[in-house]
Image (cartoon, rainbow, N blue to C red):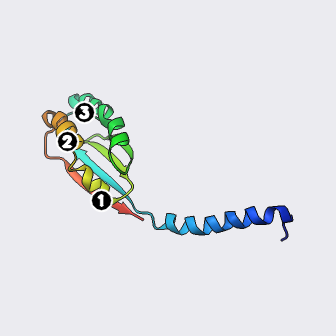
Amino acid sequence: MHFPRSLNKPLLALLAATALVIPSLAFAEKAYLEITLKVDPQDRPAAGAVYAKYKQPFLSKISGAESKELLMRDDDVQVLHGFASRKQAEDYLHSDLFNKDVVAELKPLLKAAPEVRIYSSN
């Protein structure tokens, strides 16, 4: 296939950039922090309010934070946090935002210790 001469340089530059970017995307680490909370049904709106209050500070202030989702289930409430790396997920668990703000506000609503899991994906 032949391209017009005027497109050769831009096309080659695009191909070269793609060759550099695609392999790094294939090996980019992502991590998910899943926190499962046992909360009575009548306390779930309050737990949801804590989630809503701290979602934007989490996304704007926590290094590597990419997403935060609230999952309401029949038996519990889950918060799924997305991070650029496992290390950043682990660091969040030691942050003031998590310990002094989120945990402090959720503690009166919890019926059991939260289950905390970190998943990595490549």
Question: Which callout, 2 or 3, points to the residue nearer the camera?
Answer: 3
Question: Which callout, 2 or 1, points to the residue nearer the camera?
Answer: 1
For the C terminus, give its image quadrant.
bottom left
Residue sitting nearer the eye, 12 or 38: 12
Residue sitting nearer the eye, 57 or 12: 12
Relative to 102, is 30 above or below?
Answer: below
Neighbours of disc 2 within 10 Å: few (<14), some (14-19), many (20+) = some
Q: Secondary structure at mark 3?
A: helix
**Residue 90 horizontal/vertical position (percent):** 25, 56
Report the Cα–Cα distance between label 2 and label 1.
Answer: 26 Å
The amino acid pointed to by label 1 is Lys
Q: Residue at x 33, y 42 (%)?
A: 61
Judging by the rendered image, the residue that carries numbered circle 2 is 38
Q: Residue at x 35, y 62 (%)?
A: 120
Chain-order first, disc 2 or disc 3: 2
Judging by the rendered image, the residue that carries numbered circle 3 is 47
Residue sitting nearer the eye, 62 or 37: 62
Relative to 72, is 43 above or below?
Answer: above
For the N terminus, give its image quadrant.
bottom right
Report the Cα–Cα distance between label 1 and label 3.
Answer: 26 Å
Chain-order first, disc 1 or disc 3: 3
Neighbours of disc 3 within 10 Å: few (<14), some (14-19), many (20+) = many
The numbered disc on residue 87 is 1
